[in-house]
Amino acid sequence: MHHNSHDMRPIQKHPLNVRVFHYILLLSFLPLAATGLLLFFKPLSQEGMQLTYDIHIIAGVVLSLDALAFTVIAFDRVVLFIARVFSLSERDVKWFMVLGGYPQKFLLGKKVPVPPMNKYNSGQKLFGACVLIGGTLLILSGLVLWLVPHVAPRDLVWLLGQIHLVAGLILTAFLPVHLFLAVYRFDDFKAMMVHGNVPYHDAAEYTPLWVEQEIVPVTANQQRNK
């Protein structure tokens, strides 16, 4: 296989179970982020704040069940995802030095050299690590704060409240950037939200190491076995 700017052959990037997990994660985290900010700033009446709290709890339960179910059903994919996002190399340092070339492209209209990336670029790996760590902290701290706040030690409850707040604010701050870049990379956005596939030319441009190290050998083996 060779790189071609018009090669539209589909490559599966996100299988169905990942897409379903991502849908539920998105649909639960958006109300969690919104209600979390309302609970922090408290701009509503007592009745409004109680409704906000109830929505926050329901969305939190949905997100927790989604994460638990995906971990059990697709444990191999979770392990692989962890391995990908926590793999660091000199390429990641160079990627962050130019921030993937996005500021230069958006602000200056220039295209700068970007280190070749694997399935996820360095920014996506950072976001993935924050989601894994921050999401775990949010779920665990949220369960304690919701279910046993009067049983757990007072200092522990205070600490978990601060952890819940900081983790929630960090992930909420990431959200608009993640959504903007997801829509900007529209082929990847459609892959995650619709059919799971990216065109070969898109994968070869943005994730050449993934194509060369994983996609091409697999395709070549399939052709030999025919």
Image (tube, rainbow, N blue to C red):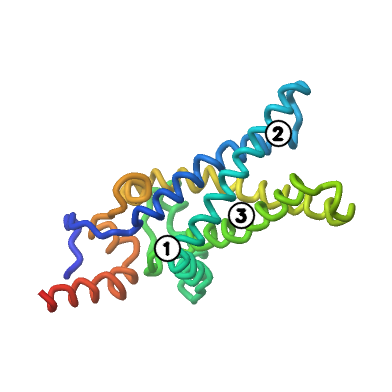
At mark 3, the secondary structure is helix
Q: Closer to the camera: disc 3 or disc 2? A: 2
77 sits left or right of 62 in the view: left
Q: Amino acid at mark 3?
A: Gly
Rendered location of residue 130, percent (x, y): 59, 58
Comparing 97 with 210, the one in front is 210
At mark 2, the secondary structure is helix
Q: Residue at x 39, y 50 (%)?
A: 19
Q: Are marks 3 and 1 in contact (CB under 8 Å)?
A: no
Rendered location of residue 115, percent (x, y): 40, 69
Q: Residue at x 70, y 33 (%)?
A: 53
Q: Amino acid at mark 2?
A: Tyr
CA–CA distance in space, label 1 to label 2: 35 Å
Q: Closer to the camera: disc 1 or disc 2? A: 2
CA–CA distance in space, label 3 to label 2: 19 Å
Q: Which residue is mark 2?
A: 53
Query: Is residue 33 placed above or below 65 in the rendered structure?
Result: above
Determine crowd level at label 1: few under 14, some 14-19, many 20+ residues with C-alpha closer than 10 A: some
Query: Is residue 116 placed above or below 67 in the rendered structure?
Result: below
Q: Which residue is mark 3?
A: 135
Q: Which residue is mark 1?
A: 120
